[in-house]
Amino acid sequence: MQETRGYKLEMHLHTSRNSDCGKECPKDIARIYADAGYDGIVCTNHLNRNDLYGYVAPPWKRLSRGVMGCYLRDFFELKDECAAFGIDVFAGAEVSPDQVTYYKPGHPYAEYLLYGVTADELREYGQSFLTMDQEQLFRWCDERGILLVQAHPYREICDVMDVRFLHGIEVANTHPGHDSRNALALELCKRTGLVPTGGSDFHYRGGEGGGTVLPRAPKDERDLAAILRERRHKIILAQGGEAVEI
């Protein structure tokens, strides 16, 4: 890490074995992010009932690894692949509980990013997140020092959720295939005083370039959440752009 520029962290990333929209395997992601000069990655694979039980861990896969073992497979592989380049990898998740999943007939629709959650906690509690409402998930996170952040709240399909039960807002989602209307998310974040975050929402090569710049390297997942709470980080507002204070 170069202290003069801070610690460049990807905070929103998906891998190929965790949803059919993710196109890159951990080995290729490690090279992509090494070439792009990142210091760390939070692996935030989709955690919803449709992807988890239909794609990530169908019955013939979960027999040997268990459901959440299948879910965490790419996280551990990414951690190993990135270690060769000196890139840290932290556990995280993009959770869409049953009440807000896209795989139901009507609104509300939303996804929540979890920062500070460990792989062990995901293994033990991940499936239970699906049946929680927003307040229950917020309370679960809050009791443990984990941040619950709404991802891309102003993307066309999404609904802005109850800010009383959020720790943060993703103010810069730089996915090149979506208009997340980041300016509106930034305005909401400033108005509510919630913690701002930013990420590439990486799914395929060329989607990197967003993220968050921290004042120092996190020691682990909980420390990452603590750093974000201090609000001394900067956000990359546009793909490949400079990091700015919010």
Image (spheres, grey):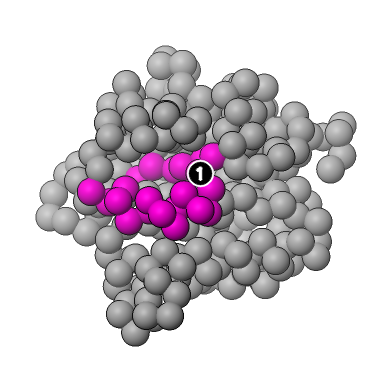
> What percent of the width, then of the height, locates residue 142?
42, 29
Q: Is residue 167 left or right of residue 205?
A: left
Q: Is residue 54 left or right of residue 151?
A: left
Residue 124 is a magenta residue? yes
Q: Nearer the viewer, residue 144 or 131?
A: 144
Question: Is 202 drawn above or below residue 243 in the view shown?
Answer: below
Q: Nearer the viewer, residue 172 or 83?
A: 83
Q: Quadrant of residue 116?
A: top right
Question: Is 199 drawn above or below residue 71 in the view shown?
Answer: above
Question: Is 135 drawn above or below residue 72 in the view shown?
Answer: above
Q: Main secondary structure of the magenta part?
A: helix
User: What element does badge 1 sit on?
Assistant: loop
Q: Nearer the viewer, residue 88 or 198?
A: 88
Q: Residue at x 61, y 21 (%)?
A: 231
Task: Please give the residue where the numbered disc 1 appears in the rendered image.
Answer: 117
- Quadrant for the N terminus in the image: top right
**Res 237 seen here:** no
Q: Is residue 51 left or right of residue 190?
A: left
> What percent of the width, then of the height, locates residue 29?
65, 65
**What segment carries the magenta color?**
111-131
**Residue farthest bottom in this picture:** 60
Q: Residue at x 40, y 71 (%)?
A: 66
Residue 154 is a magenta residue? no
- Quadrant for the C terminus in the image: top right
Q: Residue at x 62, y 69 (%)?
A: 77
